[in-house]
Amino acid sequence: MILLDPLARPVIGHRGNRAHAPEDTIPSLLEAVALGVDALEFDVHVSSDGHLMLMHDATLHRTTDQVGALATRTRAQLEQIDAGYRFTRDGGASYPWRGRGATIPAFDDVIEALPSSLPFIIELKTPAATEPVRAAVRRHALSKRIIVAGFSAKSVRPLRNAGFAIGASTGDVVRALPRAFLGLDVTPTCDAFCIPPSHNGIPVPIAALVRSLAKSKTVTHVWTINDPKHALRLWSQGVNGIISDDPGAIRAARR
């Protein structure tokens, strides 16, 4: 799989084609596919009736026409919410996706909509999603084309040795940093590091991490990179994947 290939340089659509369409919606994901992304990244929460739903936030107000916690709504209720309601590219002068049917999608519907060979990174936003993801991976036979990641070790640790690739939690990255600073090899218990270029304003030593992970062949995917020049610098440092809101621009730079 390209997401685990230490020689590959995949462009990964962050929540789809987020710069141009409402994040974590089927239209956004399909736009990224049409642009030729190598993989997708999206986030999952769990509805009140136990369904995996694509959404970054635990609450609805930032991206939709509703307020309150996602976890208090059923799948059927969430599928009626306008997830494009607050999408704007001009600071609020216009909202071109309002009323166009971009709703909060169920994971199962997303898998049915996407190409059957496309790899993706599933970001667990709550430990409540851990076991539903395990079941969904089996149900859709996804184990060979996914990385499951999450900031919280509580979310991802139970899935280690579950038969699919696991991304580093925040704790995994923090534990690797001292050895990376010293130029020592790091042998993590995960398959991929999906990391930002900075955390709380502090730069992450990406080049040092890449060097320390080299012998283990653990791949590094960096988010969220929307400047093509920044992407090229990261690739020159040995980073593997670039996770971008604007994957079309990053693909053009890679060429």
Image (cartoon, grey):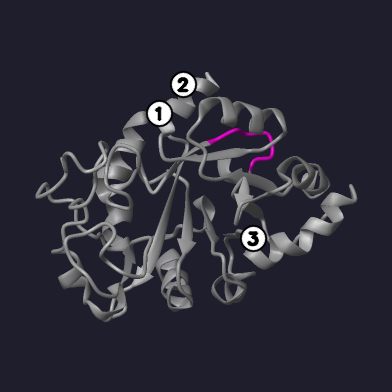
Q: Secondary structure at mark 3?
A: loop
Q: Residue 249: where, in percent of width, then height?
A: 43, 26
In the rendered view, tell whether residue 231 sits above or below residue 224: above
Q: Write the residue at 16% across / 71% down.
A: 76
Residue placed most toward the observer, 25 or 90: 90
**Occupied quadrant, residue 63:** bottom left
Query: Are the residues tagged 1 and 2 within 8 Å (C-beta)?
Result: yes
Label 2 or label 3, whichever comes before in sequence order: 3
Q: Secondary structure at mark 1?
A: helix
In the rendered view, tell whether residue 141 sits above or below residue 12: below
Please indicate, yes or no, whether residue 187 appears anywhere in the rendered image.
no
The label shown at residue 168 is 3
Residue placed most toward the observer, 58 or 73: 58
Task: Give the amino acid type for the residue marked by disc 1 in the picture.
Answer: Gly
Please identify the dominant SS of the magenta region.
Answer: loop
Magenta range is: 5-10
Task: Give the amino acid type for the residue marked by disc 2 in the picture.
Answer: Ala
Q: Which residue is mark 2?
A: 252
Please indicate, yes or no, whether residue 253 appears anywhere in the rendered image.
yes
Quadrant location, the N terminus: top right
Label 3 or label 1, whichever comes before in sequence order: 3
In the rendered view, tell whether residue 66 sits above or below residue 199: below
Q: Residue 68: where, in percent of width, then height?
A: 25, 74
Q: Which residue is mark 1?
A: 248
Q: Secondary structure at mark 2?
A: helix
